[in-house]
Amino acid sequence: MKTEVRVIGRVLIVHIRGELDLNTAPSFRSVVEQQLDANPDVTNILLVMSDVDFIDSSGLGVILGRYKRLRSHGGNVIVVAPSPQARKVLELSGLAGIIPICDTEDEAWAKSVGV
């Protein structure tokens, strides 16, 4: 897994490439937590998942954990352009009913401003 992160205003954008699973979830969690701790004004995370090849329950758990952290402060996590594989797992797990999924980054930006 490879992650690219950037902060724009109150939004943390995380582009994930590769697999988000038992082996990579701790690294993902660490990267995101470091960014959230370093940028206390961040209220929303856009998870760009167009290049995610595989996601398992550990990956879902780490996403849900960041969602819970932000929701407790009025923020949100928004999944952006998930690959067909990632979308299927998000839907089957029920996470798609909790975390918004947007087809484009522009759509996610509009939601993040309105959240």
Image (cartoon, rainbow, N blue to C red):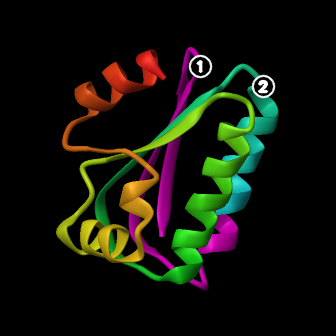
Q: Give the image location of residue 68, x and y in percent.
A: 68, 50
Q: Is residue 64 left or right of residue 14?
A: right
Q: Residue at x 74, y 38 (%)?
A: 72
Q: Residues within 10 Å of mark 1 (few under 14, many from 20)?
A: some
Is 47 drawn above or below residue 75 in the view shown? below
Residue at the spot 53% in from the left edge and 73% down from the top edge: 59
Where does the magenta region start and end? 1-28
Q: Find residue 25 and report its horizontal and vertical position in percent.
A: 61, 72
Image coords of residue 26 (percent x, y): 69, 71
Q: Amino acid at mark 2?
A: Pro
Q: Name the chief secondary structure element in magenta.
A: strand
- The span from disc 2 to disc 1 (Cα, nearest Å) is 9 Å
Q: Secondary structure at mark 1?
A: loop
Which residue position holds label 2?
40
Tell me if residue 22 is in the magenta stretch.
yes
User: Is 41 placed left or right of 83 in the picture?
Assistant: right
